[in-house]
Amino acid sequence: MHCYGLRAAVLGGVLCGLTLTAGFLLAGMAGLAAASAIVFAVGWVVYFQSERAVLTALRARPVSEVERPELYRLVRELCRDARLPVPRLFLSPTTQPNILTVGCSARSAAVCCTEGLLRVLALGELRAVLAHELAHVSRRDIAVSSWSAGLASLVAFCPLSALLLQLTASYGREYHADAEGALLAGDPMALASALRKIDMSTAALPLRPRGPLTASAHLMIAHPFSYCGFGRLFITHPPTGERVRRLEALAGYPRLLVAPALCRGTALLPARRSGGCLPPGSRWPHTSLRYRPGAGGAPGARVPVATDLTSLPPRRRGVLRATLIT
């Protein structure tokens, strides 16, 4: 959070300095006074009106506890465990599953879920996603992210607003929120499962990158736009695969390597580390990948390595099975 906030503070200071310098060079002390007034006015609008701009872009409305009692129950339990005030809850009619948190502080935080999120995720996955958002509140980085969203919403030129978000957002912000949210929820695999579902759905139902909505992309738990065209400019989230891998490691799940079987019935012993494809006979550091004796291959023979079953042709996936040895 310190690096994230420092970058935002430096950017804000540079923009303020440029504005004041331009005012002084154009009209002397009168220009400096006018520029100062503009800086204070823009700062007030950005800091205090960013929440309204973000929620309006998503067409969000406040949701009551009578309407969504289960959602309130989950949030209250997590806030009690995290020793945080209960945030205000909003609901967006967007069909894309996503969620964001905006606000100036923990007491003014607002969590906005989409209809698609509540429809797609199971209860345990929803709890993990809410814990991720509360981790942002606990880390106190929502003020910085809300400030950058408000500043970017004032810029009509898409590439410039994208540059502002790229300068103020970082991958580490999401990685830390994933880890702290998984620990708060007590189930890293639930968050990993939720991220997979959200990633697949956002790819199938991307939002259009337009207006204030583009300024709120970095606030969401997953990139809401297409990875092509203008949407590519606003990518501030780390790859979902890497986020899932870290959550699996946090849960104690080893990363298995799978090698293609050359004959039916071959069982494989996994390596201890992940990697790319290796030619037969190559050595991989700290691995013990080999055919099981008596399965049709030479005992101890090394084979090409693939990191994921999905990287193999469908006809070869059916003849694979991995056996974990400690």
Image (cartoon, rainbow, N blue to C red):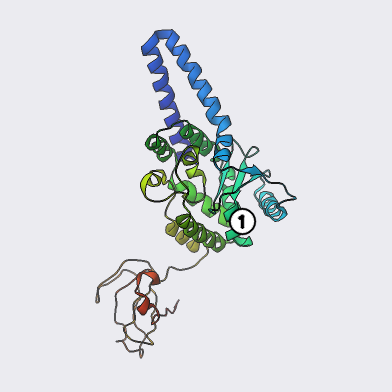
Q: Is residue 104 left or right of residue 6?
A: right
How far from the left and from the top, in percent, is residue 29?
43, 8
In the picture, residue 289 is in which quadrant?
bottom left
Disc 1 crowd, CA 10 A, few/some/many (<14, 14-19, 20+) = some
Q: Which residue is mark 1?
A: 118
Between 187 and 72, which is closer to the camera in this rendering? Answer: 72
Q: Is residue 254 left or right of residue 52?
A: left
Which residue is located at x 49 percent, y 61 percent? 196
How far from the left and from the top, in percent, is residue 282?
25, 73
Above or below, 229 against 263 in this view is above
How far from the left and from the top, in percent, is residue 313?
34, 74
How far from the left and from the top, in percent, is residue 120?
57, 60
**What SS does tag 1 mark?**
helix
Which residue is located at x 52 percent, y 21 percent? 40
Q: What number of labels is visible?
A: 1
Q: Amino acid at mark 1?
A: Leu
Above or below, 111 against 297 in this view is above
Q: Looking at this rendering, what residue extends furthest in the bottom direction?
A: 294
Above or below, 105 against 121 in this view is above
Q: Work out which quarter of the rendered image holds the C terminus and state it.
A: bottom left
Q: Is residue 111 left or right of residue 318?
A: right
